[in-house]
Amino acid sequence: MNKYVIVLIALSFVLSCSRPSYEIVSFQGPTMGTLFQVKFVKTPELQALDKAKIENEIVQLLVDINQLMSTYISDSELSLLNKSPAELPFSISQETAYVLQEAIRLHNVTQGALDITVGPLVNMWGFGPQQRPETIPSSDSLEEISEYVGIDKFTLSDNTVTKEHDMVYIDLSTIAKGYGVDKIADVLEKYGINNYLVDIGGEMRLAGQKPNDQDWRIAIEKPITRERAVQRLITVGNNAIATSGDYRNYFEEDGVRYSHLIDPKTKKPIQHNLAAVTVVASSSMTADGLATGLIVLGKDKGLEIANDNNIAALFIVKEDDEFVEYRSLSFDETVKVLN
């Protein structure tokens, strides 16, 4: 063999052995009534990382969040708060207080559309943890419930909550999954992981890229019930993304469709033709809450608020037999649409 060929082969072997090794590490599991998934790129400088240690830390983190904020766990911090009597200050953790503060802020941003006290209404309409029968509440029962539904029915001072009525019921399901995503991202970044995808039940946060400088691609689902199809394929950079829709969780009675999304002002399921809202933000908790608030508002008011507050939002509206998209100005500036 020609000596120059031998040298070339040897050099090629050395280069291939010294080429940085990149792999995607992933794991998943149950949490918050759904599944979580974590993917991250293990770069050469992260080869010493212990995947099992990181996974165990994240699993325990989610257990702790559930024990604080779940309404399905009878002795969670939030459940005990909901059972506490009126006018008696109830001490809560810094974590729960932080999520409550953001929920109150987003309530104001969405002009009351996101309201974490609508739990009794959700239960009454048959969509809550009590799983009540699918019956239509009477006007009298809706009026009676008004005494203890509304974000003004409790006060938050530092790490203390005081309810104005025994029946005040706080439900953080519209924001807690996003909080969990953010906390998982914090764990990954603590270990120096800067290329990752975190997902809890469709609420996601992404950073960096996959191997070979490929962006993380996100599929926005078409809001239809009979099948799963892609509405848009996008990339969002180092951001979080959340979608809220009324096309999966609903019931019908006497030919009328009742969504699980309750309008705090009417105390009834939303009736407009806005099928889904996707929000992109730096925080998954923020995106999670905003997506719910904006869909409750409907397309016109939701788009107005999104533009006024620089919220990156995509509104998918059912018009006749088609889905029509409306995008906020910030959405076009933040998101790269691939199809």
Image (tube, rainbow, N blue to C red):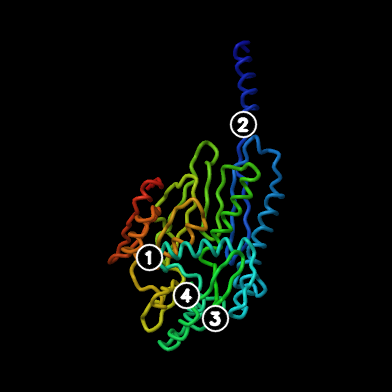
Q: Position of residue 135 (x, y in %)?
A: 46, 85
Q: Are marks 1 and 3 in contact (CB under 8 Å)?
A: no
- Pointer 1 or 3: first along the chain: 3
Residue type (three-letter) at the residue carrying disc 3:
His
Q: Which sits in the foreground, 111 or 178?
A: 111
- Mark closer to the chain start, 2 or 4: 2
Foreground label between 2 and 1: 1
- Residue that label 1 marks: 275
SS class of the residue under badge 4? loop
Residues under labels 4 and 3: Cα distance?
11 Å
Task: Specify the quadrant of the image occupied by residue 65.
Answer: bottom right
- Label 1 – label 4 distance at C-alpha: 25 Å
Q: Residue 55: x percent and y percent?
A: 67, 52
Contact between marks 3 and 2 (CB within 8 A): the answer is: no
Q: Which residue is mark 2?
A: 20
| Mark 2 or mark 4, whichever is nearer to me | 4
Answer with left or right where residue 184 lies relative to residue 297: right
- For disc 3, the marked residue is 165
